[in-house]
Image (cartoon, grey):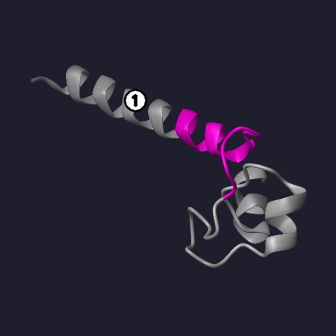
Amino acid sequence: MDMTDSAQELEQAVRNDAILRLRNCFPEPERPSSRFCSCCGEEIPEKRRLAVPGCQFCVECQREFEA
């Protein structure tokens, strides 16, 4: 494998990670809300889980992803 192949693999990995993070930023109503944040592991308050169906992140981590 040469440097070009390695660079392309790294670029693809970065793209895949960005796509995954974007998909996780937006709630999916059919997906149940997580009880614990997918990023930091802290418990997501019940009021947030009910207000934002499908949420996967606590408020602080959601702010980080949207920044």
Q: Nearer the viewer, residue 50 or 22?
A: 50
What residue do we see at 29% from left, 28% from top?
Answer: 9
Residue 49 picture quarter: bottom right
The crowding category of the residue bearing disc 1, from other C-alpha atoms within 10 Å (few below 14, some 14 to 19, many at least 20), is few
Q: Nearer the viewer, residue 59 or 36?
A: 36
> Which range is magenta?
18-33
Q: Secondary structure at mark 1?
A: helix
Q: Position of residue 11 (x, y in %)?
A: 40, 29
In the image, taking residue 2 as reference, residue 20 lies left or right, namely right
Residue 45 picture quarter: bottom right
14 shown above or below 2: below
30 shown above or below 25: above
What residue do we see at 23% from left, 29% from top?
Answer: 6
In the image, taking residue 40 as reference, residue 16 lies left or right, namely left
Question: Which residue matches tag 1?
Answer: 11
Q: Position of residue 12 (x, y in %)?
A: 39, 27
Q: Position of residue 56 (x, y in %)?
A: 66, 56
In the image, taking residue 52 as reference, residue 17 lies left or right, namely left
Quarter of the picture containing the N terminus is: top left
